Image (cartoon, rainbow, N blue to C red):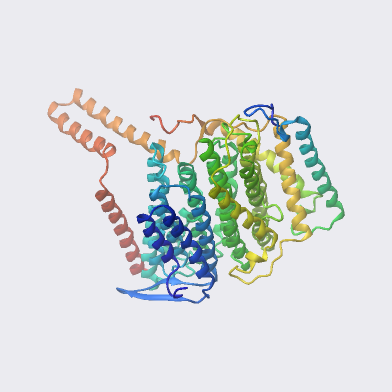
Amino acid sequence: MWSPDVPAFVPLYCAALLALFTRGWLRVAIMLAAPILGGLHLLGIEPGVSVQLQLLTFDLEPYRVDRLSLLFGYLFHIAALIGVIYALHVKDTMQHVAALLYAGSAVGAVFAGDLVTLFMFWEAMGLSSAFLIWASRDERSVGTGIRYLMFQVVSGLLLLVGLMWHAQATGSIAFNQIGTESTAGWLILLAFGVKAGFPFLHNWLTDGYPASTPTGTVFLCMFTTKAAVYALARGFPGTEALIYVGMTMACFPIFFAVIENDLRRVLAYSMINQLGFMVVGVGIGTALALNGAVAHAFNDVLFKGLLMMAMGAVLLMTGRMNGSDLGGLYKSMPITATLCCIGAASISAFPLFNGFVSKSMVMSALMYEGYEYVWLAMLFASAGVFHHAGIKIPYFAFFAHDSGIRTTEPPVNMLIAMGIAAVACIAIGSFPSLLYNLLPYDYEYSPYDMTHVLTQLQLLFFSALAFVWLNMRGMYPPELRSTNIDIEWLWRKGLPRLGRGVVAACRAVSGSLGTAGSAMLKQPIFKATRNNLQMALARNWPTGSMVMWVGVFLAVMLVAGILSTRLS
Amino acid sequence: MTDDNKTGDGKTYWLDQPKNQRTVRVSLYVACAILVVIDFFVHRHIMFAIEKIPAFYALFGFVACVVLVWIATWMRKFLMRGEDYYDVEP
């Protein structure tokens, strides 16, 4: 179609630009054409293509194609196409432009051959996706979008500092295996970790996803975290710490998911749980485990996207997203309910659905490498997935007690997008070679043997039995209108309280000075504390000062980096 | 599990009838029973000692989910706040 040297993000970026100036059918055509033509073009690209250029003293490689990046390239084009179809009925230009830029940036990031290019797309991904949250245009989304963006920017800064340090130490900015021998390696790992939803850094997912528009969340859940998994697989395969990080990620969110009321937040927690399986795979680092990690990333986009689309359809048609307000919707949305159940079966890893063929690779790799306790924890997480995503999501939205809501099926474009994802879930699950042939590392693996199928079915059916038993005994926690405290408490409640405490303490000090000391002493101190502290905490910071502090932060890190390399 | 019928549009759906709900539950029980019975006739590949327990995966799945729900319900005691928790001052 066009030269193989044209980087894969270009069609999506061009479409974003054109979507800005076009309306109606023309825009629809452009938005559909970009991922379709881009994806078809990518099918004809052979691994080994590389575009290099010299900028100042850097050897940049803005476009590098190998089997690993190619897999994610295909994935992001499929994801973009599904997301675009799902959002076709939306008239909001900002959302379309942001979504296309976001998809393009994710594609750019996975084909980046050097860390500087990666950093630029990394930041572009963060910024463009924040607009998908702000697209809700309500009070809640403003604050959420800013908190979301903070996480993305911090991730970018860590990457920037890490890459400069790394370049200083190794003399190369090429993005290959980095490892954790140096501090720079740890900084870059942390940068990837923020976007991969590591524990304690995961909050942007659970805060951001439920605040976006029904269509925006579908895009949000498809790109950032998967690009992070790609980056981890490229830079840190076989880093043992990742096994334990991933195990934590797989286990802790399921408890939150069980008691969470907002069904899109349940899916966000479920996303962290699934990312845990991928991170464990990267941590093991064998060919089977890495294949499993990236295959699971591929499948997760399809089934998590499908579940998120089903919930988006429910939100669009009913205006409600809390489990406590929903129920009985299968009566008026039978097609959506069926598609949602296919997504639920896929994420739960039922045989013949795609979750099964990728998750079992990671589980087998854990067995082969002898990680018995991690394996047990991941088995617990597998049962938990079925419980909160496989049963809870469809059950409370479409079945359970009848909420009395009667609506209709969502617009046909939404059904088509969900249908494509559902067909892909079943096709990959039933014919795993479709996906296995694309995997980057050579390893023969067959998920369908007697042991795998039987044990997985036992695990799932008895999990379902436990759900029924708990429900019949009235022991299943009811859906309640509530907020559950998570790590975000620290900055949404803890820090403001601390700030107010400091101000109050200063007031008290200046007050007691006023009665005890002379007025001469009191006046200036009181003024100083009031003006500085109160103003500092209360006023709107200009962007300039934030940039300055970012600069100071970077400078300190750089000096530290240079000093450490000079001294060692 | 659906408690009443004839809400909303006044039609009665298949799953609204207690008889059919029972059919669904009984099918699940039968499927579970079959899966356990098969476990005694089929040779599973064993990698870890713990897998030697008969019907290990079935037991594990049931116990894991019950424990999960118990712990999560208990967590509500200290994690749950009002819906507008973050919207109100301090």
x and y percentages locating residue B59 in the rendered image: 76, 45
* Quadrant occupied by the C terminus of chain A: bottom left
Q: Is residue A407 above or below residue A188?
A: above
x and y percentages locating residue A153 in the rendered image: 38, 53
x and y percentages locating residue A226 in the rendered image: 52, 57
Residue A429 shows in this picture: yes
Give the farthest residue toward the top: A515
Q: Nearer the viewer, residue B78 or A471?
A: A471
* Labels in figure, total: 0
Q: Nearer the viewer, residue A568 or A93?
A: A93
Q: Residue at x 33, y 69 (%)?
A: A566
Quarter of the rendering containing residue A442: bottom right
Q: Is residue B90 above or below residue A26?
A: above
Quarter of the rendering containing residue A332: top right
Q: Residue at x 28, y 49 (%)?
A: A546
Q: Nearer the viewer, residue A72 or A490?
A: A72
Q: Is residue A52 above or below residue B29?
A: below
Q: Nearer the viewer, residue B37 or A548?
A: B37
Q: Is residue A505 left or right of residue A207?
A: left
Give the farthest residue toward the right: B41
Residue B45 shows in this picture: no
Give the farthest residue toward the front: A25
Q: Residue at x 77, y 34 (%)?
A: B20
Give the farthest residue toward the left: A520
Q: Is residue A152 left or right of residue B81?
A: left
x and y percentages locating residue A291 in the rendered image: 61, 65
Quarter of the rendering containing residue A11: bottom left
